[in-house]
Image (cartoon, rainbow, N blue to C red):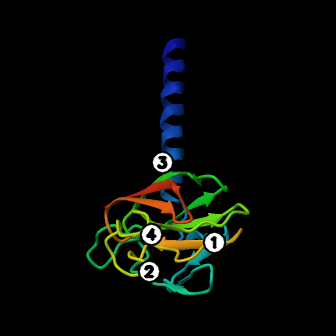
Amino acid sequence: MKTFVVILIIVLAAVGAYWLFSDQEEEMPEENNDTMLEGDNGDAMMDGEDGAMEDDNGGAIENEGSNGTGSSGEEQATPETVTISFDGSAFVPSSVTISQGDSVTWINDSETLTWPASAQHPTHTAYPTEGGCIGSSFDACRGLEQGETFTFTFDEVGSWNFHDHLNSTIFGRVTVTE
């Protein structure tokens, strides 16, 4: 008889625990539709009910829907920016992989000028879009002083070599995926 009472107490405790925890899941508050994003300088940006966001410079960023999908219903990735620094003798990291539409910012962390540009030296024509000052649009077009930056958005999928136009033995690669 004692065994039966112990089993009954265990079963009742298990049923009570199940009821208690399953009831709490249903009472959880609704999810907040605000999305926090972090800007390039670490500042938080808010995507609230109106769908409006601001970039680090106060410019508007369009939002095609609060659920992160575009009008086609497919998931839309938020463009990102990857940083490559120049330490005076190399680009760090020398190789990065990003998604199509993402950007890379080169920052000069040295006292030596650096001029990031598309390969091949000296024509800068490896990246397929024309523009810039010599060949490709992927070109800083001048030496960057210490602390200065150059940002380029990669719209073409592929593997894109780059170099320091002022010292062509310093190079790297940006791989862009879909």
Measured in 3D between alpha carbons, the distance from the residue under mark 3 to the one under mark 4, in whole angstroms, is: 35 Å
Measured in 3D between alpha carbons, the distance from the residue under mark 1 to the one under mark 4, in whole angstroms, is: 28 Å
Residue type pointed to by label 1? Leu
Between discs 1 and 4, the one toward the N terminus: 4
Q: Which residue, given by chain and number where applicable, does mark 2 sit on? A: 132
Residue type pointed to by label 3? Ser
Q: Which residue, given by chain and number where applicable, does mark 4 sit on? A: 78
Q: Which mark is residue 144?
A: 1
Which residue is farthest right? Answer: 111
**Is label 2 or label 3 in front?**
2
Q: Which mark is residue 94?
A: none
Q: Which mark is residue 22?
A: 3
Measured in 3D between alpha carbons, the distance from the residue under mark 3 to the one under mark 1, in whole angstroms, is: 60 Å
Measured in 3D between alpha carbons, the distance from the residue under mark 2 to the one under mark 4, in whole angstroms, is: 26 Å
**Is label 1 or label 4 in front?**
1
116 or 78: nearer the viewer? 116
Between discs 2 and 3, the one toward the N terminus: 3
Question: For mark 4, does the 10 Å Cα neighbourhood hold few (<14), some (14 to 19), or many (20 or more) residues?
Answer: few
The residue depicted at 43 percent of the width and 72 percent of the height is 138
Instruction: From the top left corner, tell me how far across and down residue 136 is, in percent.
Output: 38, 75
Between discs 2 and 1, the one toward the N terminus: 2
